[in-house]
Structures are given as structure tokens and as C-alpha cells.
Image (cartoon, helix red, strand yellow):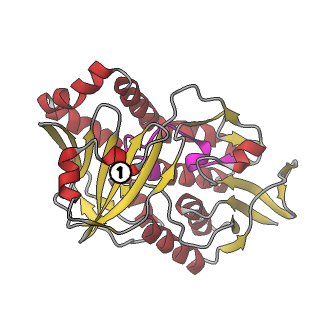
């Protein structure tokens, strides 16, 4: 019997597997797709995420960025990180680097899906595999979460993310967030001659339609050739009743997700993966739920606050101009999330 079975071999699942091996646990990852998998993602690692990835022994190739810039019409405000740079990195690059590290440490990978979960007093079984613990890192619409009946209804308006890359030299060493009445655009440098542009908006809208809502950004990209297909994700808001259910621990998006608005998805995913594995290695799995709340608290609070402000047209229009009048406060908020 192995120590940990990980459902989902994306970046967060692999991070959990690598951490488990670092702590001497035996681990198997179950994933249906070939690595690397490309998905809609802002692709910006905040400084805390860069630190977490390096602690796993991984140094993905990317482009450093020094902070965040909010832009709306003629208003802009910048906040710079105090704890080192973030890193813009293609999701496929990060995924491949984590997969290589997992192989190096002897993580077993099995092609398939985790279904038919049965929990027992001292172990969990899934598809004929037995493990002391199951870590669910199977994404936004987690089949494990659904199978266990842990989905909680969401009553907020659905939001979706769309992402595409463009062959263009990054024009800044910041991640830019462009705002308009009903959408946001995240621009992340991911290579010396490539940027990723992720768009967040309501359902049923085409990438080109949303991008057209940002004339200044569109002007920068007019001569840039798309270097990837459009990929989408959503609805973004997902809520789990609990991040821990018997011998199953949910990490990353599987444990719940508010929105991509503050760019902390990978940072919180890596933090919760580490917290889950550390709790198991210490023989204190009951501590994971509290550790999950602590690791995600600022993300959940600040993202929810921004979303609620964005739902009010007057507040949404005033957000960037107000931040520009108080750059010190914006910088403080950026570093609270970094």
C-alpha cells in the first residue's frame, strides 16, 4: 500500500507528489492526459509561488516581472513587489519542469482517472488502488469533489477565462491588468518575444469581442501574430463544502476557487498542496482544513471584495482612478497577495 494517491497530474498535483517524495512518502499520480497539458491560465507566478517552486527543486524558464499595473482609460497605477520578482512562465513549461522533477524523485505515474472511491478506517481505495491517503488535485470541476458530494451551489454570476499568446516583445516588466465596464485583460510576459493575454468576462463571448473592449491594448497587439490557440476555463467560481473529507484532502482549484482576478491561482494551489502533504507527513491530517483556510484567506477575501466592487458600475469605474490617487495603498494590496 502506498502512502499517497494523487488524483490529477497538473502542476498542483505534481507539486504535491514532489513534496511527498521530499518527505519520504511513497506516491502515485493518476492523470488521463499526456504531459504537458495546456490550459487557460494567466501564467504569472507571484513571488511566493516562485519560492514554492524553487523549494521543490524546480527552476522553470520564464520572464521575471517586478509587480502589477492596473490600467483604465487614462488612469494607471503600479505596485512593486518587496519580496523579489514574480515569474511569467508558460503553463506547459512549468508543467514539464514539474513532471521531470517528479520522475527524478521516483514518483509513479498512472494513466487514468480516480473514480469509485471507497474510504476505510486505515486507507482509501480507488479503482483497485489502495493508499493511506488520497489528494484530489483534479482541477476546477473536480470529479473527486463531485463524487464525494462536496460541491456547494454557487449563486454568483458565472465568469469565464479565455487566454491566447501573441508574438510580441513585452513592453513592460510588470503584469498589466486592463479594466473596462464588463471585463478585465491580464497581460503577462512569458518569453523574450511573447506575451500571454488572459481575458475575464461573462459567458458566451468570443475572445476577439472581449479584446476589442480594450483599444489601447488592442493597438499594441495589432501587428502581433497569435502564437497559440484560444483556450477557455469556467465557470470560475467553485465552492467545496470542506477541503478535507475523511482520508481525502482537496488541494488547488479542487478545494474551491473564487476568480482569477487577483492572479493567485497557482500560488494558492502550491501552498495548499504543501500544506496537505505536510499535514500527512506529520501525522496530523486533521490540521489541514485550518491550514487550507490560512493559506487561502487573503486570496478569498481580496478577490471577493474586488468582484463585489466590480459588480457595481460606479465602483468599477472608480476603482483604478482611486488606486492611482493612493499608490501606496495599491502597493500594500499587491504585496499582501505576493
- The answer to whether residue 43 is seen in the rendering is no
Residue 50 percent coordinates (x, y): 37, 60
Vertically, is 97 above or below 176?
A: below
Q: Magenta span covers which residues?
A: 249-267
Vertically, is 312 above or below 227?
A: above
Residue 165 percent coordinates (x, y): 35, 63
| Number of on-image labels | 1
- Using the rendered view, name the quadrant where residue 69 is placed: top left
Quadrant location of the N terminus in the rendered image: bottom right
- The answer to whether residue 295 is seen in the rendering is yes
- Is residue 329 rendered magenta in the image? no
> In what element is the residue under mark 1?
helix
Going by the image, does 126 lie left or right of 213? right
Q: Residue at x 56, y 47 (%)?
A: 253
Going by the image, does 195 lie left or right of 77? right
Question: 245 or 314: which is nearer to us?
Answer: 314
Residue 264 percent coordinates (x, y): 41, 46
Question: 231 or 113: which is nearer to us?
Answer: 231
Mark 1 closeness class: few <14, some 14–19, many ≥20 residues within 10 Å: few
Q: Mark 1 points at which residue?
A: 208
- Is residue 258 rendered magenta in the image? yes
Residue 10 percent coordinates (x, y): 57, 62
Q: Which residue is drawn at 39% across and 72% down?
A: 59
Amino acid at each position: 500500500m502506498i502512502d499517497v494517491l494523487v488524483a490529477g497530474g497538473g502542476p498542483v498535483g505534481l507539486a504535491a507528489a514532489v513534496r511527498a517524495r521530499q518527505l519520504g512518502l511513497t506516491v502515485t499520480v493518476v492523470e488521463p492526459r499526456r504531459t504537458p497539458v495546456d490550459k487557460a491560465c494567466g501564467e504569472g507566478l507571484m513571488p511566493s509561488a516562485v519560492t514554492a517552486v524553487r523549494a521543490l527543486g524546480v527552476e522553470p524558464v520564464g520572464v521575471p516581472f517586478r509587480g502589477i499595473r492596473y490600467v483604465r482609460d487614462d488612469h494607471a497605477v503600479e505596485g512593486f513587489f518587496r519580496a523579489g520578482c514574480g515569474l511569467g512562465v508558460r503553463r506547459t513549461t512549468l508543467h514539464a519542469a514539474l513532471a521531470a522533477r517528479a520522475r527524478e524523485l521516483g514518483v509513479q505515474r498512472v494513466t487514468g482517472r480516480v473514480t469509485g472511491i471507497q474510504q476505510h478506517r486505515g486507507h482509501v481505495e480507488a479503482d483497485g488502488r489502495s493508499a493511506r491517503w488520497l489528494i484530489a488535485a483534479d482541477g476546477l470541476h473536480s470529479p473527486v469533489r463531485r463524487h464525494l458530494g462536496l460541491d456547494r451551489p454557487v449563486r454568483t454570476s458565472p465568469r469565464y477565462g479565455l487566454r491566447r499568446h501573441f508574438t510580441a516583445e513585452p513592453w513592460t516588466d510588470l503584469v498589466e491588468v486592463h479594466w473596462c465596464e464588463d471585463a478585465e485583460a491580464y497581460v503577462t510576459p512569458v518569453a523574450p518575444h511573447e506575451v500571454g493575454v488572459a481575458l475575464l468576462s461573462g459567458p458566451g463571448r468570443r475572445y476577439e469581442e472581449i479584446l476589442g473592449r480594450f483599444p489601447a491594448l488592442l493597438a499594441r497587439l495589432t501587428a502581433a501574430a497569435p502564437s497559440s490557440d484560444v483556450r477557455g476555463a469556467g465557470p470560475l467560481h467553485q465552492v467545496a463544502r470542506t477541503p478535507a473529507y475523511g482520508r481525502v484532502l482537496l488541494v488547488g482549484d479542487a478545494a474551491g476557487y473564487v476568480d482569477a482576478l487577483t492572479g493567485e491561482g497557482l500560488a494558492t494551489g502550491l501552498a495548499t498542496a504543501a500544506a496537505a502533504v505536510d499535514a500527512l507527513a506529520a501525522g496530523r491530517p486533521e490540521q489541514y482544513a485550518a491550514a487550507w483556510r490560512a493559506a487561502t484567506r487573503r486570496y478569498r477575501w481580496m478577490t471577493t471584495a474586488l468582484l463585489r466592487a466590480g459588480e457595481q458600475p460606479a465602483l468599477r469605474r472608480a476603482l483604478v482612478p482611486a488606486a492611482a490617487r493612493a499608490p501606496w495603498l495599491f502597493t500594500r494590496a499587491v504585496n499582501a497577495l505576493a
